[in-house]
Amino acid sequence: MMDDHKNIDELLAAYLLGELNETQANEVSQWLAKSEENMRHFEQIAQVWNGATKEKEVSFNANKAWNNIAPKVQKKPFYQSPLFRVAAAVIIILGAANLLFNLSNSNTEVFTNEVLAVNDVVNDTLQDGSVISLNENTKLSYSDNFNTNTRTVKLEGEAFFDIERDTSKPFIIELDQSSVKVLGTSFNIKSDPKDELVSVYVKSGVVLFEYLSNSKDSTYLSVTLLAGDKVVYNKTTHRLEAANDTSTATEIYWMNKELIFDGIRLGQVTNVLESVYEVKITITEETSKNCLLTTNFQNANIDQIMEVIAITFELELEKTNQGFTLNGASCEEI
């Protein structure tokens, strides 16, 4: 079946939609493992899928959509939900059949080695060439067999990963009630044992996130995240939650002191700035809150940022003991 070009594309499309049974999925994974040409063909189809998904989301309102589907989302398979711009529940194997192992089997690893970050951010390079950055109060553990047959680590805290690509050895990050599996990509994970939420933000590449959906029978579900996607998992309810519209703007601020705003309304931008810089920002005219800001700030102080915003939207900036005030009307037509 996999030798026929039409059947190949049909199977790969169903693969990306999460519509294959276990036997069919195994057939696809075996075909992917046969050659680099097969891998490239799959990646081309995945890129088309990614592009089509992004086009549909130009006017997507995440909060509004979540409110509409929240009562139904637990009654349907996750791949039917438009949640988080996720391109469906896809098992990304790319030539590595052992990427399909059950999450519980990974508990056989004995994590004897540690990388610790206590009061400062710690940067390190693992044996496979992957670069990691650990936020304060974070621990990364791995076994003596790391990079032998698999690349498995355990994370407690927050870290940014830039994974060295190796199709024969998927990189696996074990979290509390969940895990992340990749071949080569960059992403941020926050998984504090004291916090009920686990968050994963993908900066580049593709990430497979697996999570415990039913503690009674240890059922795990998986969801695939593409570049720019973020998922938030609640360890108490065993459900995925909606990320707010500006959550990715500060996702890796702890590491590079960079704020990224991509078409974000000014009213939401000021909420982010208030949180990061602990200041009060007031916008006097409601229409000005609708202005869309697209820019990056690197190592900028709050005074510089507010000046840029005021100049960009032709607003009057007033600095007081309480914080900042933006006066004037702008962006009336938005």
Image: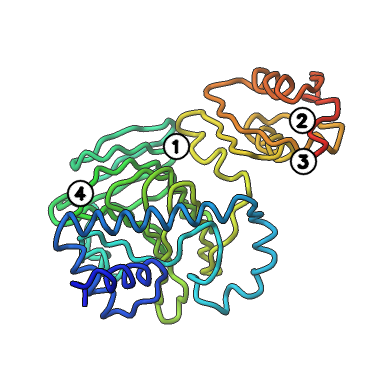
Q: Nearer the viewer, mark 1 or mark 4?
A: 4
Q: Residue at point 57% right, 79% down?
A: 75
Residue 269 on image: x %, y %? 68, 36
Pointer 2 residue: 281
How far apart, in angstroms, are the residues tagged by discs 1 and 4?
Answer: 29 Å
Density class for disc 3 (Cα within 10 Å; few <14, some 14-19, many ≥20) is few
- Which badge, 3 or 1, comes first in the chain's sequence? 1
Density class for disc 2 (Cα within 10 Å; few <14, some 14-19, many ≥20) is many
Secondary structure, mark 1, is loop
Pointer 4 residue: 166
Q: Are marks 4 and 3 in contact (CB under 8 Å)?
A: no
Asked whether, in this view, residue 258 is left or right of residue 293, the answer is: left
Pointer 1 residue: 136
Q: Residue at point 39% right, 64% down?
A: 210
Q: Amino acid at mark 2?
A: Ile
Q: Amino acid at mark 3?
A: Ile
Density class for disc 1 (Cα within 10 Å; few <14, some 14-19, many ≥20) is some
Residue 97 on image: x %, y %? 20, 66
- Which badge, 4 or 3, comes first in the chain's sequence? 4
How far apart, in angstroms, are the residues tagged by discs 2 and 4?
Answer: 47 Å
How far apart, in angstroms, are the residues tagged by discs 2 and 3?
Answer: 21 Å
